[in-house]
Image (cartoon, rainbow, N blue to C red):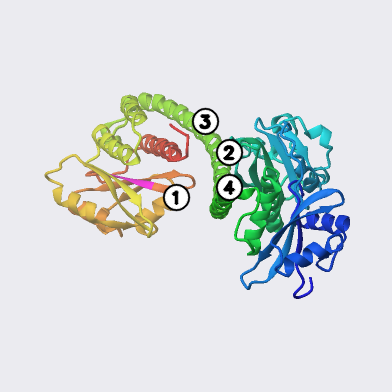
Amino acid sequence: MREGAPAAVAVLSEAGSVERATRAFLDRFDVRDGSLASCPHEVELITACQADHLTVLLDGLEADLVAAVDDDGRRSAVLTIPTARDAAVSDPVSPVLEEPLDESPAIVWLKDLDGRYLRVNRRYVDQLETDADCVCGRTDAELTAAGSIEGLRLDEGDTAAGSDLLELEYRIGAFEERPAFVALRFALHDGEGQPTATCSVAAPVAEESLARSECERLMRIDRWGRLDAFAIRQELLDEWGLTLADGSSGPPLDRDDRVAAVLVERDEALATAARLEEELLKEREQWGSLGAESERAARRADELAGAVAAERARSAELEESLVRAEARVGELQDELTAVQAELEEHLRRAEALEAAASASESNGLKWGTGSQRALSAALVSLTEWNSVLNHAVGTLGSEGGWDATIAWCPERRGSMTCGAIWMRDPAGLATFENQTWKQRADASRAEFGRARNRMAATCVLELQSAEDPVLRAAAAEGMGSALLVPISGGGETIAMLELLCRTATAPNAELMVSLEAIALQLGAIAQLLKLTEVPRWRV
């Protein structure tokens, strides 16, 4: 409009928007450059302060022309064309919404209060690639996720979109190639202010402002559809900062209390918009929190997946170790059976020789079948290697006639320490016993080293000239001979039996063979006990 020219405004009660109403008015009543060609004289009277209110005929319609002034005192002519209202219309959706819905650049759909689609606009049909007839009359539960914009929320268990809330702002997740949407819902009302349906407006998340502006526009159109032309005029005058020149609200507003109701409804709409804005802010914060939690959960899932993979690899290794151990157990059991058979055969021969052997030949040393059976029976119930050694040296000493029996165990640094000891005369050999417990013998040198390398029983005489200090100490206590019997397991020496006697002669060959057999038996038992460390294996 030219500066200083009067403002010509058309307000129609069922107009789709202010812009369309203005365009229709300009086309129909020949309004150009802020003037009305159909009634220039009346407009001139209004703007020249010669009249504040006139009635004019435009194309057969009676219109109301009033003067309005702004804060600076400038006068404008405001033209209002009332139209008849059909009070008998029972449609839950006002007809004034039909054209604005299809022209909207946003996705818009209407539902009744039971959740059935009443209308969808062109943008809805284009975005979902569906047909309006296939959607209208059905609920989201009756449509597929591809044919319903809110069906995906129902599939994901989100009941907010299908709840009884008439006003809501929420998000709709992406589906296949369809982007995520921001959606706003508001209630449509009848002339008495009762809700009759809901209108939802959606746009991609990147176009959130479009959804919000379209929602506000359609809410205004729905409200205008329930008002008469003068109520709409008063709302626009307030919005534009204009007041009627005569100070009144104009007919019939000065006789109708609906103005106050309109203002209250407008205030409620503003409050609703503010509340929806706050809800959207909270939802955004919640989405951000859920996103961070999702990232932490993903990292934790990756860590757990790595731990599971490591445990599976460890389990596979243990399975392979178990298979090898079971195979080794079988081998050791076969070996032990053979040793026991050999030992039994040797015992039978020893029994025959025992009766014929003289005391001088055996030097008082003996080992019969009874002694062997007693040793074997006791070893079966033992589950610790130290207990096995203690019982072995005790039985060998007491049953075999030795004066002292010692079991030496290797250490990591190449030395051997006393693991078990038995003395026939503990009081008389107390000094020797204490010295033996403290002594560390070299596992690779002197008599110990030679017996270990031979892997067979070695008899040592003339103990007073021996290289090993323990043997020399034994000679000082009256010992005349010693028998060293290595115990092997897994190809290495795991213990050494040292048997001491006061006589200075070597034991007979049968006794030495018996002691070597006992060493084989002890080595096999040590291997079986070692296998108890393997998971899920028990002896």
Residue under label 4: 265
In the rendered structure, find residue 454 and report the number of the disc placed on it: 1
Which label's residue is closer to the chain start, 3 or 2?
2
Q: Is residue 480 left or right of residue 285?
A: left
Q: CA distance from mark 4 to mark 3?
A: 99 Å
Residue 334 is marked as: 3
Label 3 or label 1, whichever lies nearer to me, is: 3
Q: Position of residue 10 (x, y in %)?
A: 77, 56
**Can you give x and y, in whole percent of width and height, for residue 408 in the image?**
32, 49
Mark 2, residue position: 165
- Please, which residue is most extreme toward the front here? 50
First-in-chain label (4 vs 1): 4
Q: Quadrant of residue 96?
A: top right
- Name the secondary structure under disc 1: helix
Instruction: Name the residue located 27 percent from the left edge and 34 percent from the top edge.
Output: 395
What stretch of residues is rendered in magenta? 495-500
| Contact (Cβ within 8 Å) of mark 4 with mark 3 | no
18 with respect to 447 (left or right): right
Q: Which of the two discs, 3 and 1, labels the residue nearer the N terminus?
A: 3
Q: What amino acid is found at the position of numbered circle 3 in the picture?
A: Asp
| Alpha carbon separation for disc pair 3 and 2 | 81 Å
454 or 207, which lies in front? 207
Instruction: Measuring from the top left, give residue 225's x and y in whole percent.
Output: 71, 44
Label 2 amino acid? Answer: Leu
Task: Inspect the image, locate mark 1, and give the three-letter code of the amino acid beneath it.
Answer: Arg
Q: Is residue 449 above or below residue 2?
A: above
